[in-house]
Image (cartoon, helix red, strand yellow):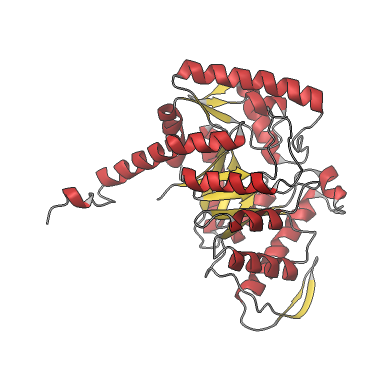
Amino acid sequence: MSVQFIGMIGHRLASEIIPATGPIFDKQYIADFAKAHENAGFDRILVGYWSDQPDGFLVAAHAGAHTSKINFLLAHRPGFVEPTLAARKLATLDNLLDGRLAVHIISGGNDAEQRRDGDFLDKGRRYARTEEFLQVVKKSWYSEQGYDHHGAYYQAENAFAQIKPLQAKLPVYFGGSSDDAIRVAGKHADVFALWGEPLASAAETVHAVKAEAARYQRDIGFSISFRPILGRTEDEAWQKAEAIRARAKIQLENSGHNFGSPKPQSVGAQRLQNAVAQGDRLDKHLWTGIAALVGGGYNSTALVGTPDQVSDALLEYYDLGIENFLIRGFDPLNDAILYGEELIPLTRRKIAARKQAAGLQPLPAAHAEW
């Protein structure tokens, strides 16, 4: 099982500790941010979705034009673009990016935010719509002839897309922690995405999703999200964490910007709040300080320590069957560069050494016996 590192790019410099600067669509920053991830050795970068922010399709297209190797993960909420059109838009973008696209499907965990874009379905019906959305999208991607679709949420007659994904299969990531989310993911997702939970609860989710996927004779991968805080020593890393908490508290109070939280209908947010209730520091290096400030509204838990300690913490999740790590920092661009200097290559080396010890990976050529 190979490890994949996913970053996240924004459309301007901003974080919990950095006030938003520059134009809301900062073309140069997007390009620089994407190139920094590519140079740091990330495998993929997430482009997020918010009801009041620039269009992710165009952010990804612009970032893709300034990179050549790194893959993209575009967040998309069903309900605002008909699935036949969404399929063509995604396939077109995959062709534009030379086959580097995956889509991250999010049904939405905040009724108020959904309504900003005109979606008044409740959460349960949003997941039912998502399931139907994915059925139609996949028909458009992979059908070689026209098809009809008559469902509860979408209707189409003789639908057909000449534009297909450049990849033989465009990967579908899926977000959500509710029973409905797990049900839909088991049928349709290639990768199930978790926020950074304690090991025990992450293991429960992995088990539940695998069991659901097995009902359809499907294998499924997993991704988990953390905000690593690194120091030369463990004490230095924890001092950085406390400084980040203090700065974030002041900025959140002064700006009124909640970064998309809270999400009262989100089971994922509730799970992070449960983690917060267990304490500030969980397992060996998991920190819930920022998750507490934002009500668990997004991927806000951190792994704190030296690069070696954080790498070992990631490996504990890897041992649960989680092979994708979405890591992003509180100083977004500089932290992406920092992760590439030691954390990412160190983790890859440790996993390669494990595989070699287990006889799953050949020795380097210089040491091979002929």
Near-viewer residue (349 or 366):
366
Residue 48 in the image: x percent, y percent? 68, 48
Near-viewer residue (178 or 341):
341
Q: Residue at x 78, y 37 (%)?
A: 264
Q: Residue at x 70, y 41 (%)?
A: 12
**Quick one: which residue is furthest to the left in this view?**
370
Residue 223 in view = no
Residue 120 in the image: x percent, y percent? 87, 52
Quadrant where the C terminus is found in the figure: bottom left
Residue 337 in the image: x percent, y percent? 51, 37
Residue 275 in view = yes
Near-viewer residue (139 or 239):
239
Vertical relation: 5 (above or below) 277: below
Q: Quadrant of residue 329?
A: top right
In the image, is 218 to the left or to the right of 23? left
Residue 178 in the image: x percent, y percent? 68, 45
